């Protein structure tokens, strides 16, 4: 689930910059787009240009949304998958913070050592902080391919349960790998229950059948 990439030699200056920020946040977005959240072109916030964080994001190249994510003591998520893989840089942690691969039941503790980690988020996973101090990761989304007409407009309704959890557990994994395998060639999240997708009729049927099997009502229309 996690692959160690290269190491940066200025992690201390990034940590100092984060520590100087107002820490009254759970999530702090570091760049912005005029386009779609998952496939838009991102620019670094003006106040971060020519700073350690800004330089780090510039060096990463053509990235998606970048955020500082705080996980408080005792906090965790529910099991899920995501459509977009993520890069992680650890800003602060404690020995009881983990990213957990729920398919292989493997727990990863990432230290503060300047390494960038690539996370395959098509794997069912969760992040948790069982320790006493907050955990802060700089988390960067891989940018997904842009949607272009013609394609499919897929809307999901119904689901008398935690519908977001159900959608993100399995369906997003399928989308993640279909994008990497170029079966899906464009993807746009319109809202939590609507996406635009470029794919074949076969993949469209595959995807909508999977969603319907989860107990949702799916409506799909071609976008011309
Ligand atoms: Fe995730």
Image: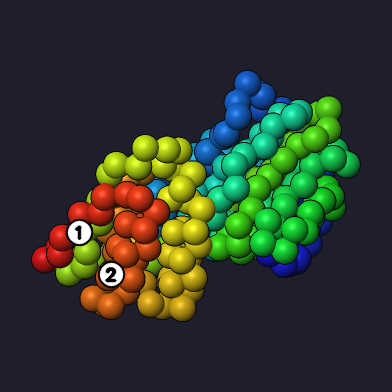
* Residue 220 image label: 1
Residue drawn at x 72%, y 50% is 99
The residue beneath circle 2 is 204
Viewer-closest of 55 and 201: 201
* Residue 39 image label: none
Position of residue 121 in the picture relative to residue 218 (left or right)? right
Viewer-closest of 127 and 14: 127
Residue 140 against residue 91 in the figure, above or below: below
- Where does residue 17 sit, x and y in percent of width and height? 71, 36
- Where does residue 195 sit, x and y in percent of width and height? 30, 54
Q: Looking at the rendering, in which quadrant would you find the N terminus?
A: bottom right
- Which element carries disc 2, helix, strand or loop? helix
Which quadrant holds residue 114? bottom right
**Given contact means CB atoms under 8 Å apart, are the residues at marks 1 and 2 in contact?**
yes
Residue 58 visible in the snapshot: no
Residue drawn at x 65%, y 48% is 126
Residue 32 against residue 1 in the figure, above or below: above
Residue 175 against residue 201 in the figure, above or below: above
- Which element carries disc 1, helix, strand or loop? strand
């Amino acid at each position: 689930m996690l692959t160690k990439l290269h190491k940066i030699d200025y992690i201390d200056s990034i940590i100092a910059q984060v520590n100087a920020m107002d820490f009254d946040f759970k999530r702090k977005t570091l760049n912005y787009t005029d386009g779609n959240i998952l496939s838009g072109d991102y620019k670094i916030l003006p106040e971060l240009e020519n700073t350690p964080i800004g330089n780090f994001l510039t060096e990463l190249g053509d990235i998606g949304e970048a955020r500082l994510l705080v996980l408080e003591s005792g906090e965790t998520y529910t099991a899920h998958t995501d459509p977009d893989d993520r890069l992680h840089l650890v800003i602060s942690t404690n020995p009881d913070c983990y990213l957990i691969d729920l398919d292989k039941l493997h727990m990863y503790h990432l230290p503060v050592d300047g390494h960038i980690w690539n996370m395959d988020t098509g794997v069912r996973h969760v992040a948790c902080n069982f320790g006493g101090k907050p955990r802060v990761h700089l988390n960067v989304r891989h940018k997904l391919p842009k949607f272009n007409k013609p394609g499919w407009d897929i809307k999901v309704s119904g689901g008398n349960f935690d519908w977001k959890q159900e959608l993100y557990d399995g369906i997003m994994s399928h989308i993640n790998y279909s994008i990497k395998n170029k079966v899906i060639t464009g993807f746009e999240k319109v809202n939590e229950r609507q996406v635009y997708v470029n794919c074949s009729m076969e993949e469209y049927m595959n995807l909508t059948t999977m969603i319907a099997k989860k107990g949702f009502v799916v409506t799909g229309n071609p976008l011309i």
